[in-house]
Amino acid sequence: MERTSGLADFDGVVSEYWPRVYRFALASLRDKSAAETIAQDCFLRAWKARDRFRGESSLNTWLMQIAVNLIRDQLRSRRLQFWKRTSQTVDAAAELLADKRTSPEMSASARQQLAAVWSATSHLPDQQRTVFVLRFVEDMDLLEIAATMGLSEGTVKAHLFRAVRTVRERAGIAAAVSKEHRSE
Amino acid sequence: MSDVHLNSNQFAAWMAGDRPAEIAVHLDGCVVCRAEVTRFESAVSRLRSSLSAVSDAQRIPVFRPPSRAWGLRMITPALGWSVAAAVAVVLMAVPFYKAFEPSAKPHSIRQVAAADVSDAVLFEQVNAQLSRNVPGAMEPLALGSATDVDAKATTSQENE
């Protein structure tokens, strides 16, 4: 039933899920223009494949599945254009941190922490980053992530475990906590 | 407060969703580790809210179902690679074609042969010029004197 009720109003689907797909693409690709293209392509593909959506997974999982595949293809083609990737990555990070709308009340240290986490996620391998973003940015549980990425729950957990360990170490969260407690 | 804190693997396992009772007990009693978990959670939550602010500020485009028009979207990666391969094959074939072009060699041989013939004719003309008894300008005189000599010889024979 979700099939008919979910996709009958496609404009409604776009307006509800666009920000989510765009946010996921932005976190994965770190480039606003590429994220917009991915979001457009995602809904275009969803439109073309709407007859094949059986409602076995949620609409969110199905759209994220399409987005994951598009992002994976984009990252593959980007590896052939490493000079482009470097410049765009820097630009996107600078834009995100400079944007006052993101959090006007954010303190300098909080901004620094955000920058550190943002930078740490950029060093993750593609699959680890996707799992990390789906878990902590998209707030999806491990089973949903497994369905989205076509992996087992155990594999997702292993990717997440490695991603958290890397981000914690690279972002200096452990060091900062110990320092705070030493100074108390 | 405990002296032994969560190590990197225990922390990562906890954040990845593993919730063993001993770690839960440790977190209840350890301020340092609890602070670390809180700090990590607030850092990723900040990342989420920052990205959400950027994505929410984006204008949601009006979706128009695609028409069946030819455009850049029709150029699939497979088609692109096929065209690139065809161009590469043609470019690689150009030197071979130039080397084995069927009309190239006979044509040049014909040209060379024609040039040889004209050279031989010219050589013969030059040779004929050089083989003359007298220069070209003096030929009429030479012809005249030869006629006189012949006439004198005829007259003397007649007189005898």
Image: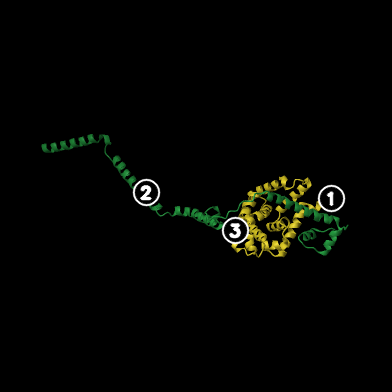
Q: Which residue is mark 1?
A: A180
Instruction: Give, as a three-letter code, the residue at label 1.
Output: Glu
Measured Cα–Cα span from mark 1 to mark 2: 94 Å
Instruction: Give, as a three-letter code, the residue at label 2.
Output: Gln
Q: Quadrant of the N terminus of chain A?
A: bottom right
Determine contact: label 1, label 2, CB under 8 Å. Answer: no
Of residue B83 and residue B115, the one placed in the foreground of this image is B83
Measured Cα–Cα span from mark 3 to mark 2: 68 Å
Query: Mark 2 falls within which chain?
Result: B
What colour scheme was applied to this rendering of the protein?
Answer: by chain
Of residue B95 and residue A48, the one placed in the foreground of this image is A48
State which mark lies toward you, 1 or 2.
1
Residue at x 14%, y 38% (from the top left corner) = B154
Marks 3, 2 in one chain = no
From this viewpoint, which residue is outermost toward the right? B1
Characterize the local packing of mark 3: few (<14), some (14-19) or many (20 or more) Cα atoms within 10 angstroms: some
Residue A5 visible in rendering: yes
Element under disc 1: helix
Element under disc 3: helix
Rendering coords of residue B49 (x, y %): 73, 51
Q: Which chain is yellow?
A: A
Determine contact: label 3, label 2, CB under 8 Å. Answer: no
For chain B, give the colour: green
Q: Relative to residue A176, is residue A54 drawn left or right?
A: left
Residue A73 visible in rendering: no
State which mark lies toward you, 3 or 2.
3
Query: Mark 1 falls within which chain?
Result: A
Q: Relative to residue B144, is residue A28 drawn left or right?
A: right
Residue B111: which numbered mark, if any? 2
Of residue A53 and residue B78, the one placed in the foreground of this image is A53
Residue A47: which numbered mark, if any? 3
Characterize the local packing of mark 1: few (<14), some (14-19) or many (20 or more) Cα atoms within 10 angstroms: few
